[in-house]
Image (tube, grey):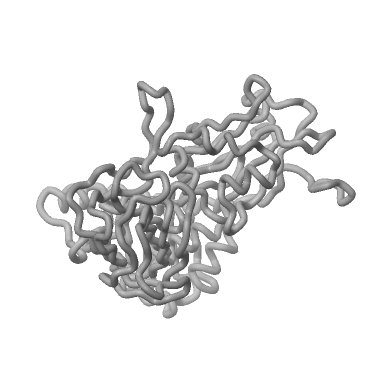
């Protein structure tokens, strides 16, 4: 673990008289206020183009970011701030001045198997075995609408998970994908499979019941969702973590699902913005609004189809449109993958492909049961010791 961190430091040509610390992004902090709080020039923000300033508004409260400081003066030297799971903002010095560049996040991809005999409950047993709350939460999400009553499990019923995760700077990073979950109880194996961004049972029936409606009557999609792309002319990395729906100023914007308003106000490059939390760890974002529905406030419960705002051109917008973002466990996902009419069952070639895919996963589950490999336990470590209490930090 130590070697990995040292190698990363050398790769970025960090000063020998410096150390790394990891912090959590405070609630209510914007990229611009972050610069101010750290005595960094606001020109870093204002020199960004429209798309980059929009990305700066995607920094999630609570996200862990890394700061390199001079060991002698405590002065900030470099910063790495993840935006989603693909890109990060890298603040560094160039020609004696600070600049910000958007770069890919370097991660290690891992595949693991977890085999457990139930002792308490699946959630508790997963956390006890792996120290990985994200894995336990994702398992609970996958079985949420399965029809299997997890409270009726008996001691020594078996659980198998085959999952994928990423590691960044030695720590588990981003979301977890559980390719297959299996619970064996009363000599019956109950399978849930992750396939094409949704959970399905063994028959190919989609399980997740969180469904979105299109939030606005639009004329066209002016910008689709993209996680990461390289712009060959600008020589920069780009991302657009939502869908832009072009529409006239004043067009009503509706909540895409039942939920509770989490934020109403101005949000960086998105201008007037609304965020709504939904069941199942989902959140929707509505940006560039002209205004909000009368009386709308944080904490208010809203229904699917309820008008919450109006299309505008606020923030860094090149024309009237709604920026619509969708997040699952605070990770941006493509809204087009969830906007549906009803739950669906696979059929035809899709079903045949699914059954072939799941056959191979079932064989891996049987292998995992036979081998009963020990669980991977996540480590909780700090990159650096805190500053001395006598310092300004």
Residue under the image location 28 percent in, 43 percent down: 224
Residue at coordinates 40% horizontally, 56% vertically from top-left? 327
**Count of residue discs:** 0
Q: Is residue 90 above or below residue 185?
A: above
Left or right: 374 in relation to 306: right
Of all residues, the one furthest to the left in this rendering is 348
Q: Residue at x 33, y 66 (%)?
A: 190
Q: Position of residue 68 (x, y in %)?
A: 70, 36
Could you say where residue 61 lies in the image, as x and y percent from the top left?
A: 55, 55
Residue with the most extreme bottom position: 152
**Which quadrant holds the N terminus?**
top right
Horizontal and vertical percent for residue 127? 56, 63
Q: Residue furthest right?
A: 390
Q: 151 or 219: which is nearer to us?
A: 219
Q: Is residue 369 left or right of residue 46?
A: left
Q: Is residue 271 visible?
A: yes
Asked whether residue 363 is in view, the answer is: no
Residue placed most toward the observer, 365 or 389: 389
Seen at 34% across and 50% down, the residue is: 313
Q: Does residue 274 sit above or below 371 in this rendering? A: below
Up the image or down, 143 lies above or below 173; here it is below
């Amino acid at each position: 673990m130590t070697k990995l961190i040292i190698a990363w430091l050398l790769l970025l040509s960090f000063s020998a008289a410096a150390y790394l610390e990891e912090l959590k992004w405070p609630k209510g902090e914007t990229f611009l206020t972050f610069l101010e709080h750290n005595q960094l020039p606001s020109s870093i923000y204002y020199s960004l183009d429209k798309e980059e300033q929009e990305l700066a508004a995607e920094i999630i409260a609570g996200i862990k970011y890394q700061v390199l400081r001079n060991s002698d003066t405590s002065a900030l030297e470099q910063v790495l701030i993840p935006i989603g799971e693909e890109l990060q903002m890298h603040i560094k010095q160039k020609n004696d001045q600070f600049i910000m560049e958007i770069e890919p996040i370097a991660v290690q991809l891992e595949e693991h198997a977890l085999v457990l005999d139930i002792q308490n409950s699946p959630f508790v047993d997963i956390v006890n075995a792996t120290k990985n709350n994200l894995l336990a939460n994702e398992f609970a999400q996958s079985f949420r609408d399965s029809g299997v009553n997890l409270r009726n499990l008996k001691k020594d019923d078996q659980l198998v998970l085959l999952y994928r995760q990423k590691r960044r700077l030695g720590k588990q990073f981003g979301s977890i994908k559980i390719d297959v979950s299996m619970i064996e109880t009363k000599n019956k194996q109950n399978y849930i499979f992750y396939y094409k961004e949704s959970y399905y049972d063994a028959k190919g029936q989609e399980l997740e019941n969180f469904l979105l409606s299109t939030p606005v009557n639009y004329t066209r999609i002016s910008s689709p969702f993209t996680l990461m792309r390289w712009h060959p002319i600008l020589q920069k990395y780009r991302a657009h973590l939502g869908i832009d729906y072009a529409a006239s100023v004043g067009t009503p914007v509706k909540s895409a699902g039942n939920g509770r308003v989490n934020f109403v106000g101005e949000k960086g490059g998105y201008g007037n913005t609304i965020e709504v939390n939904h069941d199942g760890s989902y959140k929707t974002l509505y940006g560039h609004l002209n205004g909000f529905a009368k009386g709308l406030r944080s904490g208010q419960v809203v229904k699917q189809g309820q008008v919450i705002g109006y299309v505008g051109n606020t923030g860094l917008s090149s024309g009237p449109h709604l920026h619509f973002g969708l997040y699952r466990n605070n990770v941006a996902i493509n809204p087009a993958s969830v906007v549906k009419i009803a739950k669906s069952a696979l059929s035809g070639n899709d079903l045949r492909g699914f059954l072939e895919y799941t056959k191979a996963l079932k064989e891996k589950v049987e292998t995992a049961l036979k081998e009963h490999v020990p669980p991977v336990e996540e480590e909780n470590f700090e990159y650096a010791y805190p500053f001395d209490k006598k310092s300004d930090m």
